[in-house]
């Protein structure tokens, strides 16, 4: 589903907010150009989003322009994420549509509350499109139960197909970033609740059955629909609510990280992660870390990096994180290497080199003067029979910092290795 581009004014506010709160442990929603979203969720998947930057205190505008809400109480407040809304018992924002889809869905919001219980209930509904008091009520409810975050979906008052709660209490007067998601199936472990860390869920469960009914009530923020006016009210602050019709998946970790030590440097290479354009490189002098960032969030589609100006004789340990739409993956495998003066690569100490002559299917001949360690890496890659291989060229550099050839496996006709003593 497409949405209109977010205004430049909003982007400027978000960028400033991210800069101010970068050291406070909070994160604004992802912005890449003019897109909103997180991880694999993009502007094409968003159904509705409310960022509470409206000047009119009685209406909250949906970023898609489809689902504006009417405020019953609530006050506009400043939050680490821009504007938000504060709720006291009985306050709500009401809508004329159910909005949250049946089946596959993801819901993200930011909240702060110091109330383990509201004035009227141990349950505080943050968003819903269902009525707990009605037997024929269907739909989704997300909120707090004695300070724990819950994600419920029911096919009737008596039948909850999802009934998931975090173990931790988050009514601690701190801001938290929450994302609940379900793939719409009864496959194992497809109901997840993420809190603050969007890599590893705080709670994983399995739906008991499929969602068979369309939601029975319109969407509401701040309390549930029922005959008790203030029952299940949320007391606290909310910001940046987003609803998607896709299942959320954090990026997969990078794989097959390989480190090769040379004179005062280490060469890193790793396999591609699908739908990822950027990576983070981290280093430690201790196996298992802690790791420090060497190369921050940067676009590196070639999936390689040369870590230079290192101490010869010191072993360095590396991991890679893939980054997708503001979310970092868990660490890759750890790879290590030891730079050595005069060393020509990991695993080979005889100092020999070779001319590697490669003839491509189109008749082009490529010749490379490389170490025997690099020859071994090339042969290992060729035996696997997939993808492409990168050879760094150090001659005729001219104005270039790096020159590389990318060799496609299925384009190579034959090759010849001519070893010689250095």
Image (spheres, helix red, strand yellow):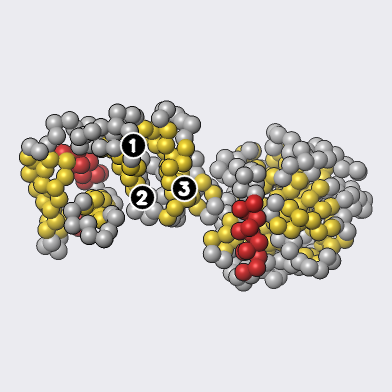
Mark 2 is surrounded, within 10 Å at the Cα level, by few (under 14), some (14 to 19) or many (20 or more) other residues, namely some
Q: Which mark's residue is nearer the viewer, 2 or 3?
A: 3
Residue of label 1? 310
Secondary structure beneath label 3: strand
Please name the residue shown 22% across and 60% down the image.
398
Secondary structure beneath label 1: loop
Alpha carbon distance from label 2 to label 3: 14 Å
Residue 368: % across, % down: 15, 50
Residue in the foreground of this view, choosing between 329 and 57 = 57
Q: Which mark's residue is nearer the viewer, 1 or 2?
A: 1
Q: In the rendered image of this protein, does residue 409 appear above or below residue 254?
A: below
Specify whether 413 is left or right of 71.
left
Marking on residue 303: 2
Residue of label 3? 296
Please name the residue shown 29% across and 32% down the image.
312
- Pick whichever of labels 2 and 3 is earlier in the sequence: 3
- Pick whichever of labels 1 and 2 is earlier in the sequence: 2
Q: In the rendered image of this protein, does residue 346 appear above or below residue 391?
A: above
Alpha carbon distance from label 1 to label 2: 20 Å
Residue in the foreground of this view, choosing between 28 and 171 = 28
Looking at the image, can residue 408 be seen? no
Please name the residue shown 34% across and 29% down the image.
315
> In which image quadrant can residue 418 be found?
top left
Q: Quadrant of the C terminus?
A: top left
Residue 67: % across, % down: 73, 67
Alpha carbon distance from label 3 to label 1: 18 Å
- Pick whichever of labels 3 and 1 is earlier in the sequence: 3
Asked if marks 3 and 1 touch (Cβ < 8 Å), the reply is: no
Secondary structure beneath label 2: loop
């Amino acid at each position: 589903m497409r949405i209109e581009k977010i205004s430049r004014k909003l982007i400027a506010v978000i960028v400033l907010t991210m800069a101010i709160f970068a050291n406070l442990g909070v994160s604004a929603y992802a912005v890449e150009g003019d897109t909103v979203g997180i991880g694999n969720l993009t502007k094409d998947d968003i159904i509705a989003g409310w960022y509470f930057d409206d000047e009119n205190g009685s209406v909250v505008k949906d970023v898609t322009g489809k689902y504006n809400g009417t405020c019953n109480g609530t006050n506009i407040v400043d939050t680490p994420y821009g504007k938000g809304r504060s709720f006291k018992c009985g306050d709500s924002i009401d809508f004329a549509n159910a909005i949250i889809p049946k089946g596959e869905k993801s819901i993200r919001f930011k909240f702060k509350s110091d109330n383990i219980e509201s004035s009227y209930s141990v349950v505080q509904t943050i968003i819903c499109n269902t009525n707990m008091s009605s037997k024929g009520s269907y739909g989704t409810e997300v909120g707090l139960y004695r300070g724990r975050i819950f994600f419920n979906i029911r096919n009737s008052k008596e039948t909850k197909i999802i009934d998931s709660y975090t173990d931790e209490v988050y009514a601690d007067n701190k801001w938290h970033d929450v994302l609940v998601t379900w793939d719409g199936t009864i496959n194992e472990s497809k109901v997840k609740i993420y809190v603050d860390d969007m890599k590893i869920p705080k709670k994983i469960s399995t739906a008991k059955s499929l969602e068979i009914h369309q939601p029975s009530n319109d969407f509401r923020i701040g309390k549930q629909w029922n005959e008790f006016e203030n029952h299940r009210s949320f007391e606290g602050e909310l910001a940046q609510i987003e609803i998607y019709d896709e299942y959320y998946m954090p990026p997969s970790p990078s794989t097959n990280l390989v480190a090769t030590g040379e004179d005062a440097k280490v060469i890193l290479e790793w396999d591609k992660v699908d739908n990822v354009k950027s990576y983070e490189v981290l280093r430690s002098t201790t196996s298992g870390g802690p790791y420090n960032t060497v190369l921050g969030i940067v676009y590196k589609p070639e999936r390689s990096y040369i870590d230079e100006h290192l101490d010869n004789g010191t072993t360095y340990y590396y991991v890679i994180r893939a980054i997708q739409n503001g979310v970092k993956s868990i660490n890759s495998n750890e790879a290590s290497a030891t730079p050595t003066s005069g060393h020509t690569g990991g695993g080979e100490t005889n100092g020999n080199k070779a001319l590697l002559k490669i003839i491509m299917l189109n008749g082009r001949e490529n010749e490379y003067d490389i170490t025997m360690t690099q020859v071994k890496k090339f042969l290992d890659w060729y035996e696997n029979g997939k993808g492409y291989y990168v050879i760094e060229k150090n001659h005729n550099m001219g104005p270039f910092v790096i020159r590389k050839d990318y060799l496609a496996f299925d384009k190579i006709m034959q090759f010849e290795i001519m070893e010689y003593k250095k």
